[in-house]
Image (tube, rainbow, N blue to C red):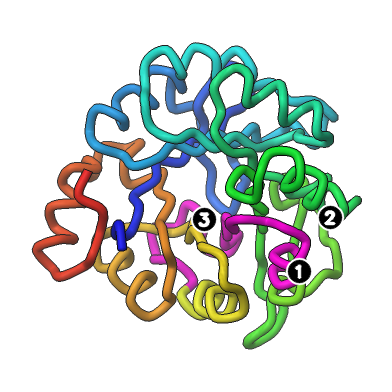
């Protein structure tokens, strides 16, 4: 086992890296290229770029950002937001992405998952799920950066996507995102135990104890982090060191 992956998540609006709470109230952080390079140098295992308004405006705006980032960093990059077709995926891979994350378009047309997996391999197809509590033990999938309800049960959607060829799930808790209160462990565990593909936990990391809880109790294969590193509360190197000292089997990049 390679260890739990530590992933830097960069949400982008236009030319800016932004950060919100519950996927709302977006605050400008800085230049996404500079932050991606910083996280690469700190030892991130992967980078996730998400265009947080792409689906709303029906376009993907990350091509140039990804192209420039690929000149500076040499770890896998997952890119999402506004991916609607196989040709969109091809374009992003051509400029330097390694994987694509799809949410809104996959909900609208689930066969897109199979089309991407068949053309580029399952390892390229990441299903992005934005989940919100519906009732105890149940969560609803949202689209358009947490703006739109779908009426779809998160667990059933994760299982269907895995059957269709998704190679990984990026699971974001809308309720925890940006709160620093910790990952929604019961949500992550429910999805992780329902599928056999890797699950990336996203939303809520406030400290290393949260990472330990979501990987040990929630069975997450990777953790995505933003607030804790964007605001310089900890570096990725410090997170890795503390995690290893605490017995968490994180990667040793």
Location of mark 2 (residue):
107
Instruction: Please indicate whether residue 250 sits to the left or right of residue 46 in the image.
Output: left
* Residue drawn at (62%, 45%) of the image: 24
The residue at the far left in this view is 245
Does the stretch in magenta take in 110? Answer: no
Asked if 109 appears above or below 62 in the picture, the reply is below
Labels 1 and 2 touching (C-beta < 8 A): yes
The residue tagged 3 is 177
Residue at 57% across / 72% down in the picture? Answer: 196
Query: For the residues marked 2 and 3, what is the alpha-carbon distance in whole angstroms?
Result: 21 Å
**SS state under label 2:** helix
- Marks 1/2: CA distance? 9 Å
Q: Where, by quadrant of the figure, is residue 1 drawn?
A: bottom left
Question: Residue at image x 53%, y 74%?
Answer: 192
From this view, report whether residue 69 is shown above or below residue 29: above
Determine the secondary structure under disc 1: helix
Q: Which quadrant would the C terminus be assigned to in this image?
A: top left
Residue 181 drawn at (x, y percent): 39, 65
In the image, 13 versus 39, the foreground residue is 39
In primary-sequence order, the first of circles 2 and 3 is 2
- Residue 60 point in image, percent of width and height: 73, 25
Instruction: Read off the magenta span.
Output: 158-184
Percent coordinates x, y for residue 208 in the rendering? 24, 61
Specify the farthest residue to the bottom. Answer: 136
Of callouts 1 and 3, the N-terminal one: 1
Numbered label attached to residue 15: none
């Amino acid at each position: 086992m390679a260890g739990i992956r530590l992933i830097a998540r960069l949400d982008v609006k236009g030319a800016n890296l932004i950060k919100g709470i519950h996927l709302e109230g977006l605050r400008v952080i800085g230049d996404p290229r500079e932050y991606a390079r910083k996280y690469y140098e700190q030892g991130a295992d992967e980078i996730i770029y998400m265009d947080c308004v792409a689906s709303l405006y029906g376009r993907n705006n990350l091509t140039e950002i990804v192209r420039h980032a690929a000149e500076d960093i040499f770890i896998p990059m997952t890119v999402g937001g506004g991916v609607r077709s196989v040709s969109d995926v091809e374009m992003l891979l051509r400029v330097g992405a390694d994987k694509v994350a799809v949410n809104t378009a996959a909900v609208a047309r689930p066969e897109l998952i199979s089309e991407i997996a068949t053309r580029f391999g399952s390892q390229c197809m990441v299903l992005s799920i934005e989940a919100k509590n519906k009732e105890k033990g149940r969560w609803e999938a949202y689209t358009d950066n947490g703006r739109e309800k779908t009426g779809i049960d998160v667990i059933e959607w994760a299982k269907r996507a895995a059957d269709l060829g998704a190679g990984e799930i990026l699971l974001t808790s809308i309720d925890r995102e940006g709160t620093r209160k910790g990952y929604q462990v019961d949500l992550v565990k429910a999805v992780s135990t329902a599928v056999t593909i890797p699950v990336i936990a996203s939303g809520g990391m406030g400290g290393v104890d949260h990472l330990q809880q979501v990987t040990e109790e929630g069975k997450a294969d990777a953790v995505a982090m933003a607030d804790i590193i964007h605001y310089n509360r900890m570096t990725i190197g410090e997170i890795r060191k503390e995690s290893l000292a605490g017995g968490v089997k994180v990667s040793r990049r």
